[in-house]
Amino acid sequence: MNIRTANYLDIDGLKFLNKELDSDAVLYQPEHFVMSDRTDDYFINLIDNEHTDILIAEENDELLGFALLYIQKSKNISCLKPQSNLYIGDLCVTKKKRNCGVGTKLINACKAYGKKQGLDFIRLQVFPLNQDGIRFYERNGFKEMMKTLECEFS
C-alpha cells in the first residue's frame, strides 16, 4: 500500500470515496447532512490550495482511502497559545477495506506530514454515535479535548 498526495487524476476516485463519507455523515447526523455531489472544481481547489492537502491510500492503482488536511493557526485571542495544527477535515476508507490497516497508515502519514510542517498537534472531529471511529482514533493516540454542544431554537 502506498500513501501519497492527491493529484488531478485522483478526482474520480475521490468523488466515489466522498459518497461513502457522505452516507456515513447522513447516517450519524441526518439533521445536518445530506448527500452531496462534489464537483471536479471542489477537488481541484483543494489540490491547488497551499493550506490544504489530500493524502491518498492506494494499492494497485485503486484508491482505498483519503485524508483531507488543513493547516490552521490558533485564533488571535489573548488566552490562547499561538499554535498551529493539522486539522483532518475528512478521513475516509472505502467500506471494503476498513479494518485492514488503511486508516492507521493514513493517520500515521498525517502525523508525519504535520511533524514535517512543524505543526503543534492534530485535531479532528468525530460523530459521537460513531463508536467504531472513536475507538479507531483513540487507538491511534487521539483523546477527547473538548466537546461541542448544540441547541435548537425552540
Image (cartoon, helix red, strand yellow):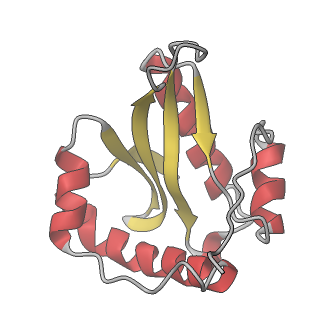
Along the line of sight, which residue is nearer the eye, 105 or 51?
51
Residue at 46 percent across and 26 percent down: it is: 75
For residue 29, which quarter of the picture?
bottom right
Residue at 46 percent across and 14 percent down: it is: 118
For residue 28, which quarter of the picture?
bottom right
Q: Residue furthest front?
A: 154
Residue at 64 percent across and 75 percent down: it is: 152
- Residue 134 lies, in percent from the top left, at 79, 57
Q: Is residue 133 left or right of residue 19?
A: right
Residue at 27 percent across and 63 percent down: it is: 10
- Residue 31 lies, in percent from the top left, at 59, 84
Please give the count of numbered marks on the rendered protein: 0
- Residue 154 lies, in percent from the top left, at 66, 81
- Residue 114 lies, in percent from the top left, at 50, 26
Along the line of sight, which residue is nearer the eye, 58 or 94?
94
Residue 7 visible in rendering: no
Along the line of sight, which residue is nearer the eye, 64 or 144?
144
Q: Is residue 59 left or right of residue 94?
A: left
Residue 136 visible in rendering: yes
Say above or below: 113 vs 149. Answer: above
Say above or below: 123 vs 28. Answer: above
